[in-house]
Amino acid sequence: MLTRREFISLCAKTTMAVSLSEVLLADLDKAITAKEIKKPTIIWLELGSCTGNTISLDNTASPSVKELFSKVIDLRFHWIFMNVEGSNATNVMRQTAKEKAGEFILVIEGSVVLADGGTWDNIAYENGKLVTGVSVLKDLASQAKQVIAIGSCAAFGGPSAAHPNPSKSVGVQDVLDRQVINTPGCPCHPDWFLGTLYHLINYGLPELDTYNRPKLFYGRLLHDQCQRRTYFEKGIFAQNLGDPWCMFTIGCRGPRTYADCPNREWNGTDNWPVGCNTPCIGCVEPGFPDVSMPFFQRYPDLKLPGFTANLDKAALAAGIVTLGGLGAHLGASLATRRLRKNLTETSLPLTPPGPHTEAQLEGIRTETVPEGAPTQAKVVRTEPAPALLQVRRPRKARRTLHKQ
Ligand code: SF4
Ligand code: SF4
């Protein structure tokens, strides 16, 4: 097995010919075959989600997701991959939780749906009754050794909890009174999940940030790792998608996003959004997507020391600083530290997206209220703006901004 130091330096490596997952899975496979460690037992629960994180895990092309599930993980329940259904499947889930109480890892994908006592998301039929996702989650979490929330919906509510959130979706940690490890992303990168799992198996709990995300993967500002950072500091900005310059002007959320995408890259170290000329939309942050929307529009203001400027003025200021030869020190100080601080702490989303009127909400009700749902399911929030600005945060993190 890798030592912790080797593992951490592998995670931080910026140039790898193969993905981190590939290296870690081969290492786990070897250790399990040599009986150095036991396969971790996993129950994977899908709640309010599109299954995108499971699909993303399929990015671990070599070894394949099939090898992952059969060789290095003792996967007992995952409704997408099971070849049984109904009580045959849920009995396995319950039995595993009983037999492996205090040992198994519970992975949650998707948001916790709370509308109408959770009945919008019934996930089992037991003893003649429908059972809600939230109640199964609470039962299993009370017996699990660790709980990992995979993807932004499970971590913070994500797109499932986007305004006006008629399903009253929330993140896993909002309903549990215990430690939850968040590996957000829309979807979660396979390396973020497998790296966290590897750390848990071999070295215990990884160091977490304010939002309970492993610092190994979510510890650095994306903007600081971006290959186009020099353009930002020189004030050279893209005007259109496809332009090879800094994409802040067309809505890049890199300056308020903590993830290692520029170095990790997607699809087996191939590329990432800015690398293919589209802005980062900040999918790993609490409050996504509401706090990132409207996509492809820049944040309105930058508060620079002594005055508030729009980005054009900021770009001009950066240009003057460079041209005037005030030097790297002042430029770096403004552009790197204060600018970043002000960007991340004072920028607010633009006017929140609709719906803003009763008529628009009516359209949403028609689309989203399931047939036969009780009448009160139709009660949805009617004041859009405050809900968007009051970003729900994990209990521990409320009122706290990133301290980096
Ligand atoms: S704003 Fe976006 S594109 Fe520009 S440097 Fe930051 S992360 Fe890169
Ligand atoms: S680049 Fe931005 S939007 Fe894309 S996965 Fe990373 S954090 Fe999410």
Image: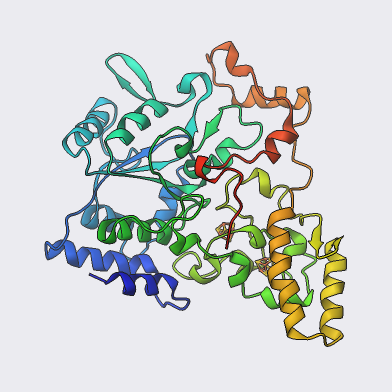
Q: Residue furthest top?
A: 375
Q: How is the image coloured?
A: rainbow
Q: Residue 207: horizontal and vertical position, in percent?
A: 40, 58
Q: Is residue 334 above or below residue 38?
A: below
User: Residue drawn 81% across and 83% down?
Assistant: 322
Q: Is residue 395 left or right of residue 227?
A: left
Inspect this view and state whether residue 245 appears. Answer: no
The one nearer the camera, 249 or 320, is: 320
Q: Quadrant of the C terminus?
A: bottom right
Residue pictured at 67% horizontal, 46% vertical: 291
Dividing the image into four quarters, tell me where ligand 1 lies: bottom right
Q: Quadrant of the N terminus?
A: bottom left
Q: How far across and down, in percent of the image, does residue 250 sit?
A: 75, 60
Q: Residue at x 38, y 43 (%)?
A: 179
Judge by depth and name the residue closer to the eye, 84 or 200. Answer: 200
Q: Residue at left 44%, top 54%?
A: 56
Q: Position of residue 68 (x, y in %)?
A: 28, 57
In which quarter of the view is residue 375 placed? top right
Tell whether 114 sits left or right of 81: right
Residue 281 visible, this angle: yes
Answer above or below: position of 93 versus 257. above
Quadrant of the image occupied by residue 239? bottom right
Nearer to the camera, 359 or 253: 253
Q: As drawn, which residue projects farthest toward the front?
A: 306
Count of numbered labels shown in the rendering: 0
Image coordinates of residue 94 in percent, x first then y, are 24, 30
